[in-house]
Image (cartoon, rainbow, N blue to C red):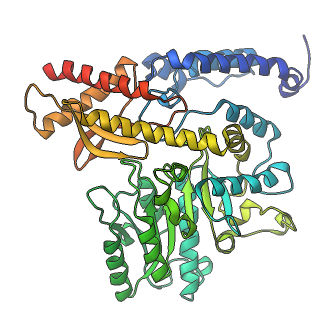
Amino acid sequence: MVGDSRHPFVLDRERFDALGTETIKMLASYLRALPNEPVDRIVPEEVRQRLISLPLPEYGQSPEEILDFLRREIMPWPIATGHKRSYGWVNSPPAPISLLADAIASTMDCGLDGFDHSAIFLMKSLGRWIMELVGFPTEGSLCLLLSGGSSATLNALTTARHRAAARDGWNLRTEGLQGGRKRLILYASAESHSSIQKCAEQLGIGTDHLRAIETEPDFRMKPPALRTAIEADLQAGHLPFAIVACGGATNTGAIDPLDEIADIAAAFDIWLHVDGAFGAWAALDPSYRDRFRAFSRVDSVTLNPHKWLQVPVDCGALLTRHPEAHRAAYSLTPDYLEAGHSEAPWPYEHMFQLTYGNRALKVWAAIARLGRNGVAELVTRCNALAKLLEQRVRETADLELLAPASLSVVNFRYRPTAHAMDDPALDDLNGRISEAISASGKAHIPTTRVHGRIALRACFLHYENDESDVEHLIALVRRLGFELGRR
């Protein structure tokens, strides 16, 4: 309307259906085109410079100008995870229904921190759903949705640290870590995610008090080495406060012997946390179910819906059997935030953040769309594709397996048969193969190191992945490996 003096946001609210329709068309076009787009798309230098140097507008732009800018300058340059032939990360593509549910959550603008609104009560059921999916005890337990695995694990370890100190007779919330008390010790597999070290640093424990427990050749923690380390620290007068076990290591998919580790944790009465950010969902796969049966005995588990559940980032979940311990470590409620009586616990009483977004709707929508059987089928299929890739690597003369398939992860490399190459030369060749695959736009498979050697690391997590992707990847690696190897 010409000359309309109302606030721009009022005008947008009045036209929200038309603007929303235009946005949905853009998003739908993006999603439908994605399978036929190059997998890896690097932002061109001229686009980078335009985005970096955008001037602040003196006057507001129209909604149409804003949407057009996003369509032209932002949407063509995503990270590769949305494409089914991106095998690099353990983040999945977003489920379309979760995108829509997340838009509803953003429109309602109700944080998941607390207070009486519908999502708080939905979260109670959603937490139980997640526990039931992976076999975590539901009675008396609590599920918190945080930004990711790092924040979920930090929450659990903060609680474990507080509980251990309280049992030793000191109040960590008032004394802090500077009262000359016992040294707190954290134990984790040498194959643990880097976030565990970050947690140790954030908690004030320091890496000197993070024990990296030796692993077997298959990358699984050695329980006897864990027991020996705990006994040595107790003998030295230290205070072991938590063990972190891998429920699917990011690099190799390795799953620690959780039952044996749970026995040790129980024997010494130490908090046992499982970092299953990527792998815990494999409890739904009959081939892996027994490896996660210890979930009934552990204290807490990290698992990320933005991985196998195909929930858009960000969303990590923490399952804990000790809500009261979290509340003791975190609750600091002024009069104006008193929760009163509620049938659902208010998350801010059990975590550091007060205000944070409502992640419940997008997670609920993904699970509701698939159901238990659908989630199990997706997880089982991805794991089976990794086994198929392992089989194809084993039977192909110019491919070499560097770590057996575990969960949906396989590490392998190209090794020419026409002439011998030492490990440094193979490292260089496989690094160039990875770069050539990205440049081709046909797939994305980054490198990692396994036993010191460069590996092509493939991870299947896309809802469309099937056997054709395995064959396509094998053919692509061999073709580019042969061409680069001749040079």
- In depth, the one of 3 and 34 nearer the eye is 34
Q: Residue at position x 54%, y 69% from top?
A: 298
Q: Position of residue 259 (x, y in %)?
A: 45, 68
Query: Image height check: is 252 above or below 160?
Result: above
- In depth, the one of 228 and 286 nearer the eye is 286
Q: Position of residue 270 (x, y in %)?
A: 49, 77
Q: Is residue 29 left or right of residue 290?
A: right
Query: Image height check: is 172 above or below 326?
Result: below
Q: Residue at position x 43%, y 46% from top?
A: 407
User: In the rendered image, which quarter contains the N terminus?
Assistant: top right
User: In the rendered image, which quarter contains the C terminus?
Assistant: top left
Q: Position of residue 147 (x, y in %)?
A: 60, 49
Residue ranking furthest to the top = 2
Q: Residue at position x 55%, y 70% from top?
A: 297
Q: Residue at position x 80%, y 68% from top?
A: 334
Q: Is residue 67 left or right of residue 74?
A: right
The reply to whether residue 447 is visible in this rendering is no
- In depth, the one of 372 and 424 nearer the eye is 372
Residue ranking furthest to the front = 286
